[in-house]
Image (cartoon, rainbow, N blue to C red):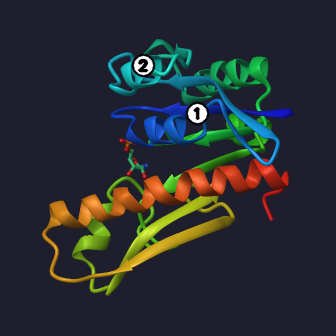
Amino acid sequence: MSIKSLVILFSGEGTNLENIIKKLHKKEFNGVGIEVALAITNNPNANGIKRAKRYGVDVKIIDHKNFATREEFDKALVTAIKIVDPNLVVLAGFMRILTPIFTSNIKNAINIHPSLLPLFKGANAIEASFKSQMRVAGVTVHMVSKELDSGKILDQCCFHRGDESFEEFKKKIHQLEYKLYPEVIKKILLKDTFD
Ligand code: GRF
């Protein structure tokens, strides 16, 4: 059995992190074993730390506040990732803007964004798509590239809007994330391609 490894980056609640661990960590699919080798957070108070540890996944804290510049922080992040040398780097609620230090060194990274890109890039995507006139809403998995939320789109998933409250809307978005992200990760690892 071949083993494919993941490094997951997160910053806060970590529900996507936990969902990916639950569905993929130490599981085998068509003779391919998947392992979350390491989770890395920039936030020492992130709830995701407890979630990862509950499943026995190692967590490394690289607090961005200990670095004078984004570049210095990214250097430390790249070094930590390269030590593991994972098949795939998964950003799951990682709330840091990355510099070319990261994007030119780590070419196998993907992210999930809670809108139908290229619409509603940036930090307030759920609010922006809720307030918009769009009759559908959804989520996007994309490659990480040097421009924020702009890398190659790998997959998307959406729902037709009804008269949901904001809370209901947000819940539907998160449910789509939990469904789509592990599927895309699995497909990349099993097929060995981002195409
Ligand atoms: C998710 O909605 C993700 O798309 C966005 O940040 C949120 C993270 O939530 N980038 P969690 O930490 O996975 O619970």
- Relative image position of residue 173 (x, y in whole percent): 35, 62
How packed is label 1: few (under 14 Cα within 10 Å), some, or many (20 or more)?
A: many
Q: Position of residue 50 (x, y in %)?
A: 37, 19
Residue on which disc 2 sits:
54
In the rendered image, residue 110, in percent from the top left (x then y), is placed at 64, 49
Picture layout, residue 114 above or below residue 5 = below
SS of the residue under disc 1: strand
Q: Quadrant of residue 193?
A: bottom right
Q: Residue at 55% of width from left, 19% of height from top? A: 57
Left or right: 168, with 123 as reference point: left
Q: Quadrant of the C terminus?
A: bottom right
Q: Are marks 1 and 2 in contact (CB under 8 Å)?
A: no
Q: Which residue is depicted at the point 54% across and 42% down? A: 23
Is 27 drawn above or below residue 192 in the view shown? above
Label 1 – label 2 distance at C-alpha: 15 Å
Which amino acid type is shown beneath numbered disc 1? Ile
* Label 2 within 8 A of ligand 1 by Cβ: no
Left or right of 51 on screen, residue 68:
right
**Horizontally, is 48 left or right of 113 in the view?**
left
Among the 4 quarters of the image, the one containing residue 43 = top left
Does the image show residue 131? Answer: yes
Q: Report the residue marked by disc 1.
A: 8
* Residue type at the position of mark 2: Arg
Neighbours of disc 2 within 10 Å: few (<14), some (14-19), many (20+): few
Quadrant in which residue 31 is drawn: top right
User: Considering the image in quadrants, where does the N terminus appear?
Assistant: top right
**Disc 2, SS:** helix
Q: Nearer the viewer, mark 1 or mark 2?
A: 2
Residue drawn 55% across the image and 33% down it: 9
Who comes first in sequence, dot 1 or dot 2?
A: 1
In the rendering, at what x and y percent does residue 42 appear? 47, 24
